[in-house]
Every structure is written in C-alpha cells, then in structure tokens.
C-alpha cells in the first residue's frame, strides 16, 4: 500500500471521527442544554409528519424509517472507520468495500427521503422545506465522504502482494 493511500485513509478517518463528535455534540446540545423551541432543526426532523401525509402513511412509520436510516448510517460509518484503520487486513478491506457500497445505497435513499416534500407536490410550510433542505444537505455530505471511502476501498486490492 502506498504512502498516498495511507494518507488518504488517515484523512478519511479524521473526517469520520469529526462527524461522529459533531453529531454527538449536536444531539447533546439540542436535547440537553437548550429548551425545545431552540435548535429545533437539530432534533427529529419536523417534516416527518408532512412526509407521512403526502404519501398516505402514518407519521410513526416515517419516524421508524428515519431511525432505521440513522442506525444503518451509524453502523456503516463505524465499519468504514474500522476498515480504514485496518487496511492491512484482508477481512477489513472486504468489509470496507461492502459497508461503503451499502452506505452509498442507503444514503442515496436517505437523500430521497428527506427531499420527498420537493418531489411530491403539496402544500408545505417553510419550516418543513427548510428542515428537508438541511437534512438532505447533511445526508449528501455524508454520502460524499462515503463515496470517497468507497473509491479508496476499490483502489486497495483485496489480496495484498507478497513482499
């Protein structure tokens, strides 16, 4: 493995750790330090109820989809971080490829989920649209980081050459 690949993996590890702490800090800040009207956009997306009404599904089902999306994204990010830190292991290189590919699919679905108010015509408040934009941008940034991870995973061969 080249020095450039190691440096690229180290930078991606730093980005994943930064994102983890940023999300942890935002969750702690939004839920513990401030009363509910403040920082409402960092809490559960307020457009979940509106999306449910637009597609004819109960809002609890959309909330469940949102939680599943968060859980899978967390698992994929954790596997990507472990895979990036263990590129010398054939198992973790394979896990990195699989988890980053799965992340591409899940995060694309997440972006579509958050952009549903724009894709389905209807009357939405500006708060719903603002929330959709913020969450779609966050999902897109994570998608870009995951895409860079996938590019690295494909570049590093699964079977390392003998020395």
Image (cartoon, rainbow, N blue to C red):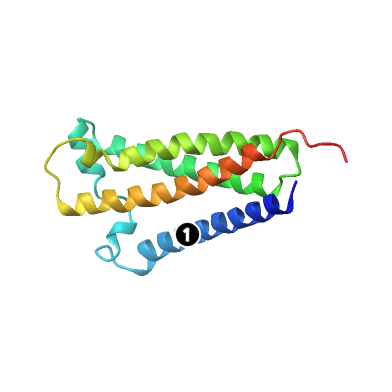
Q: Residues within 10 Å of mark 1 (few under 14, many from 20)?
A: few
Residue placed furthest toward the left: 123
Q: Nearer the viewer, residue 62 or 60?
A: 62
Q: Residue at x 23, y 31 (%)?
A: 57
- Horizontal arrangement in the rendering, residue 1 relative to residue 18 (left or right): right
Q: Position of residue 6 (x, y in %)?
A: 70, 52
Which residue extends farthest right?
A: 163
Q: Nearer the viewer, residue 28 or 91?
A: 91
Q: Position of residue 91 (x, y in %)?
A: 72, 35
The residue tagged with tag 1: helix, strand or loop? Answer: helix
Q: How many marks?
A: 1
Is 135 displayed left or right of 10 in the figure? Answer: left
Picture quadrant of residue 52: top left
Relative depth, front residue between 139 and 7 = 7
Q: Residue furthest top?
A: 56
Q: Residue at x 19, y 35 (%)?
A: 120
Residue 101 image-quadrant placement: top right
Residue 142 x %, y %: 46, 49
Residue 68 seen in the figure: no
Q: What quarter of the picture does the C terminus occupy?
A: top right
Answer above or below: position of 155 versus 27. Answer: above
Asked whether, in this view, residue 23 is left or right of residue 1, the answer is: left
Which residue bears the numbered disc 1? Answer: 24
Task: Name the residue furthest bottom.
Answer: 33
Please state the horizontal and vertical placement of residue 96, each as a whole percent of the image: 62, 39
The residue under the point 38% across, 40% down is 110
- Left-right relation of 74 to 6: left
Q: Is residue 70 visible?
A: yes
Q: Is residue 125 above or below residue 116?
A: below
The residue located at (71%, 45%) in the rendering is 87
Frontmost residue, 111 versus 7: 7
């Amino acid at each position: 493995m080249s020095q450039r690949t190691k440096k690229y993996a180290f930078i991606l590890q730093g980005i994943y750790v930064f994102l983890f702490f940023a999300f942890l800090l935002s969750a702690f800040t939004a839920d513990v330090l401030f009363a509910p009207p403040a920082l409402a956009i960092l809490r559960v997306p307020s457009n979940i109820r509106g999306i449910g009404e637009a597609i004819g599904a109960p809002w609890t089902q959309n909330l469940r989809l949102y939680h599943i999306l968060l859980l899978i994204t967390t698992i994929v990010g954790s596997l990507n971080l472990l895979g990036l830190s263990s590129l010398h292991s054939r198992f973790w290189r394979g896990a990195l490829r699989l988890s980053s590919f799965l992340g591409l699919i899940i995060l694309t679905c997440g972006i579509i989920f958050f952009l549903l108010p724009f894709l389905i015509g209807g009357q939405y408040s500006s708060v719903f649209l603002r929330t959709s934009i913020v969450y779609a941008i966050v999902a897109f940034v994570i998608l870009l980081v995951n895409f860079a991870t996938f590019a690295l995973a494909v570049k590093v061969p699964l079977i390392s050459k003998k020395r």
